Amino acid sequence: MEKQCIYNEDKVCDNCGECRCDLDPEKICDNCMQCMIGENGWRAISISGIAFEENEAEEGSQE
């Protein structure tokens, strides 16, 4: 099975080298998932807020 491109889900990996490891920038990403899993088997993400885009036509408005 061919390896999927990390940045483009419609593309097969062609080893372009653009995908660098977040933990070691000298390493090309090999999908080891250590950046997501971490040394304890999980990672926590702190979210300070959520921003929503406003719709062009808001609900309840009339043209």
Image (tube, grey):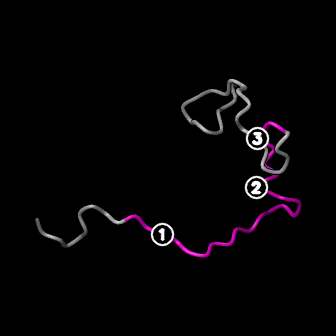
* Closer to the eye: label 1 or 2: 1
SS under mark 3: loop
Report the Cα–Cα distance between label 1 and label 2: 23 Å
Numbered marks: total: 3
Q: Residue at x 77, y 64 (%)?
A: 43
**Residue 45 relative to residue 9: left or right:** right
The mark that comes first in sequence, 2 or 3, is 3
The stretch drawn in magenta includes residue 37? yes
Q: Residue at x 85, y 40 (%)?
A: 26
Q: Type of residue at label 3?
A: Arg
> Closer to the camera: disc 2 or disc 3?
3
Which segment did they paint magenta? 27-53
Crowding near the residue tagged with mark 1, few <14, some 14–19, many ≥20 C-alpha atoms within 10 Å:
few
Q: Give coordinates of residue 48: x percent, y percent.
A: 61, 76
Q: Residues within 10 Å of mark 3 (few under 14, many from 20)?
A: few
Nearer-the-camera pick, 45 or 16? 16
Please state which amino acid type lies under the numbered disc 1.
Ala
Q: Secondary structure at mark 2?
A: helix
Sequence-wise, the earlier of marks 1 and 2 is 2
Residue at label 2? 36
Question: Residue 21: where, in percent of width, then height?
Answer: 79, 44
> As displayed, is residue 8 above or below residue 37?
above
Which residue appears farthest toward the front when viewing the image?
26
Give residue 13's quadrant in the image.
Answer: top right
Q: To which residue does mark 1 refer?
A: 51
